[in-house]
């Protein structure tokens, strides 16, 4: 490779770096990165929202990542903590006991069960979701499994 070819390669790399820097300015919107209160570093606000009394929603904005004022001038309502309602086990289901949860080992036998798995909800209580496990031991070893019924869940993949 001669000097002319090396200079062409270096020029191409410099142009690519410059274009990458310019492109980055368009990729990161200024609404996501708000200036910090002291003006030194940008602050990234979370993308959560709150409901206004009129049914519209507002998000957070900088520099302190506070919720925007509602369109009618009101402040968005503070979310109230919601406790999930206890769910009744399905008929014919087996509730996982402490003894089942603390099994030292599970046998590798395929006897599928449809487990009711408690999910974490952010805004409202959620009902458990069905998930198929290869057997009751593997199902009850999961902390979020409440109960199970014999047989695979309809249209579900098997979890080992």
Image (cartoon, rainbow, N blue to C red):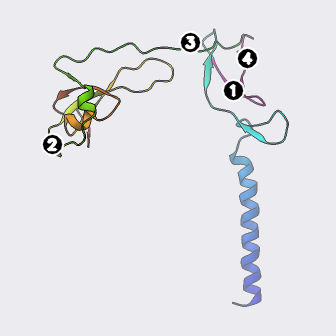
Observer-side mark, 3 or 1, equals: 3
Observer-side mark, 4 or 2, equals: 2
> Gap in Å between the C-alphas at discs 2 and 1?
49 Å
Quadrant of residue 160 within the rendered picture? top left
Q: Position of residue 96 (x, y in %)?
A: 25, 26
Q: Secondary structure at mark 4?
A: loop
Residue furthest bottom as drawn = 2
Q: Secondary structure at mark 3?
A: loop
Residue 20 drawn in magenta: no
- Extent of the magenta region: 57-73
Q: Name the residue nearer the viewer: 153 or 73.
A: 153
Query: What residue did someone put label 4 on?
Result: 69
> Gap in Å between the C-alphas at discs 3 and 4?
19 Å
Observer-side mark, 2 or 1, equals: 2
> Gap in Å between the C-alphas at discs 1 and 4?
10 Å
Q: Secondary structure at mark 2?
A: loop
Q: Secondary structure at mark 1?
A: strand
Q: Position of residue 148 (x, y in %)?
A: 22, 27
Q: Position of residue 155 (x, y in %)?
A: 24, 34
Q: Position of residue 69 (x, y in %)?
A: 73, 17
> Gap in Å between the C-alphas at discs 3 and 1?
18 Å
> Gap in Å between the C-alphas at discs 2 and 3?
44 Å
Question: Image point 77% across, 40% down: which residue?
Answer: 42
Query: What residue did someone put label 3 on?
Result: 80
Query: What residue did someone put label 2 on?
Result: 110
């Amino acid at each position: 490779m001669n000097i002319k070819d090396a200079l062409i390669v270096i020029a191409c790399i410099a142009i690519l770096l410059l274009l990458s820097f310019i492109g980055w300015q368009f990729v990161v919107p200024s609404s996501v990165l708000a200036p910090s209160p002291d003006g030194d570093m940008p602050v990234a606000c979370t993308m959560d929202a709150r409901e206004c009394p009129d049914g519209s929603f507002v998000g957070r904005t900088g520099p302190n990542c506070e919720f925007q004022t509602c369109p009618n001038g009101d402040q968005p309502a503070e979310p109230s903590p919601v406790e999930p309602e206890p769910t009744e086990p399905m008929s014919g289901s087996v509730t996982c006991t402490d003894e089942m949860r603390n099994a030292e080992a599970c046998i590798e036998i395929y006897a599928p069960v449809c487990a009711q798995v408690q999910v974490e909800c952010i805004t409202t209580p959620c009902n458990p979701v069905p998930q198929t496990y290869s057997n009751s031991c593997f199902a009850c070893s999961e902390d979020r499994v409440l109960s199970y019924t014999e047989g695979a869940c309809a249209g579900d993949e098997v979890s080992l």
